[in-house]
Amino acid sequence: MAGRIKEEDIALVRERARIDDIVGSYVTLKNAGGGNLKGLCPFHDEKSPSFNVTPSRGFFYCFGCQEGGDVIDFIQKVDQITFSEAVETLASKVGIQLRYEDSGAPVQRGPGNQRPRLVEAHKVAAEFYVDQLFGAAEASIGRQFLDKRGFDKDAAVHFGVGFSPRGGEALISHLRGRGFTNAELVASGLAADGQRGLYDRFRGRLMWPIRDASSDVIGFGARRLFDDDRIEAKYLNTPETPIYKKSKVLYGVDLARREIAKGRQAVVVEGYTDVMACHLAGVQTAVATCGTSFGDDHARVLRQLLLDHDQFRGEVIFTFDGDAAGQRAAVKAFEGDQAFAAQTYVAVEPDGLDPCDLRLQKGDAAVRELIGRRVPLYRFVLGNVLSKYDLDRADTRIDALRDAARLVISIRDRSKVDAFTRELAGHLGMDEDQVRSEVYKAASRSTPASGRGHVQAPAAIVHGAGTAEPARPRVDIPSPRDQRFVIEWDVLKVAMQHPALVGGAFDELDDHDFTHPWLGAIRAAMAKIGGPAAAPPGEAWVVAVRDAIGNDPAAAVVGALAVDPLRLGREPDEPYALALLARLQELTCARRIQDLKSKLQRTNPIERADEYNRMFGELIALEAYKSELRNRAISGAI
């Protein structure tokens, strides 16, 4: 893998990429006088423009949300990508060949240096398919298909929909004419190798380009149009390739990512036409999986777009059909609910219409109303569980209670368990205490390793020379891997696995930054032996931390921190590590701000003016510091 981009190339990108041109492709800018341009901020909602661009200085700043920076900062923030990715994106726009520190020669990043050629092949193919849709006589069936579903030519162009000729070699010939080799065509998934040689993988189908978050076409989804198509599957997707991994790809993410980050909402639909219908109806946060069910990797993609954390919470809305298959999909989604700190919801149309058919039959407003009527995913699944039982019979009500109790104890937000217990009692027409008792029984039978349960502290605490305090009620200690502690967990993972990346910066942390007692104990143990900056090489560091903890229960999770993979998908670097530390400190700062605001509300500004003014000044300083930490965290794209 290439190293850091050469500083002189970064400077050249800043010089060549005019900030007014780049920002102008995202924001409508108008002359504000004095050499300044002004528009509506892309980073927060506003009615009056407060977003300013000064081309002469190559700088932007929003007086509403205080976001600012140069052209690289803008791309990094608006597209939610890393610094290096932002530089590479701009370099490709202005025609600069970047060089990296490990070699003086220009290099390209990607799996085996294949990505640039494979991406280019897909770009050419996408353009070819679009030309075919609007220029080939045999593509009329595709145009009719779109028209019947309410999509005109402008909609097709917006989403890049195309048509693959039936002949079997049209795309191959076109790509060969553009200089692509047979090996590249096969590696891209655009062609397959049969007994008679290469042939177009997609033939006689309506084509949807599947783009990654940076808008590169990396694959296609193809819909059957002709009855005599030899491949019976209605939808055919690009196979796994070096650039296309279906478990990590969401259709429409290129169009939706900024709206998802801006609105802290993602809508997950089931098909390509559903994504089109939602976006055209005004639900521009819609995405869909590509030929596979929604899984953990898809959840990770959405979490990154949502900046998903307990204190930065958004919402994920799933749309399902109301039939049995849709109910099974909802249960599966609920099983993966722990992947999100965001609140999860489900939107089901009463008549069983998907968003595409709903828009066609009832209009754009009906699609928006469908999303607006969302209900908590838990409540939808609970309804499905209870629907399996005859609640008019006492014996089956007990069976329903036991089944539903397991659902109640799986709720991620522990503060809501009592509320849902009361709700369940109401559904069943049973006494709350009886329902609560069954929920407690289900909790005692739950397995902590499941990820939804909690870790129990010892029932007796040993004191001195073997004397034991009488048994007390068991204390419910949440798992250190609970979503509430994910940033704390990730910081310690980096410190454990890559101590050199956090180095002396880790010493700035203290016990206030770790809200879970075990994770705080591990931080203290690291500090006790000199911190990550003084870490010995290899496994000796892990052993030293474990030995420093001693008999503390936290020792049980040291090994997990040492082997748990980072949620990154690439090798971590120092910017990532420092951004992670900044995110943790930001959360601490947010808690301090909340405490200070509470104290201010309880302080009389007249009777205790000096104290009030001191606290108010401290609050202003903390708000500024929190903003600085937030910028640091975003710049590292953790």
Image (cartoon, rainbow, N blue to C red):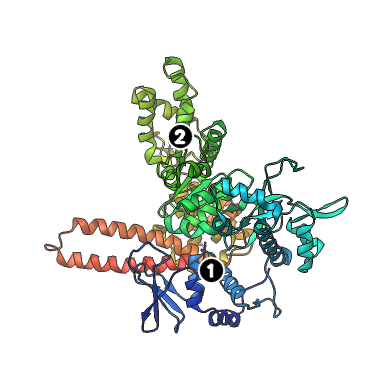
From the top left corner, tell me how far across and down residue 263 is, in percent: 42, 56
In the depicted view, which residue is nearer to us: 177 or 332? 177
Q: Residue at x 48, y 45 (%)?
A: 359
Apparent side of residue 212 relative to residue 519 in the rendered image (left or right): right
Whether residue 409 is visible, yes or no, is: no
Q: Which residue is mark 2?
A: 350
Q: Secondary structure at mark 1?
A: helix
Density class for disc 1 (Cα within 10 Å; few <14, some 14-19, many ≥20) is some
Q: Which residue is mark 1?
A: 575
Q: Farthest residue in the right direction?
A: 196
Inspect the image, locate mark 1, and give the three-letter code of the amino acid beneath it. Answer: Pro
The relative height of residue 87 versus residue 166 in the rendered view (above or below) is below
The relative height of residue 110 versus residue 415 in the rendered view (above or below) is below
Inspect the image, locate mark 2, and give the three-letter code of the amino acid beneath it. Answer: Pro
Apparent side of residue 380 relative to residue 138 in the rendered image (left or right): left
Residue 187: name its quadrant: bottom right
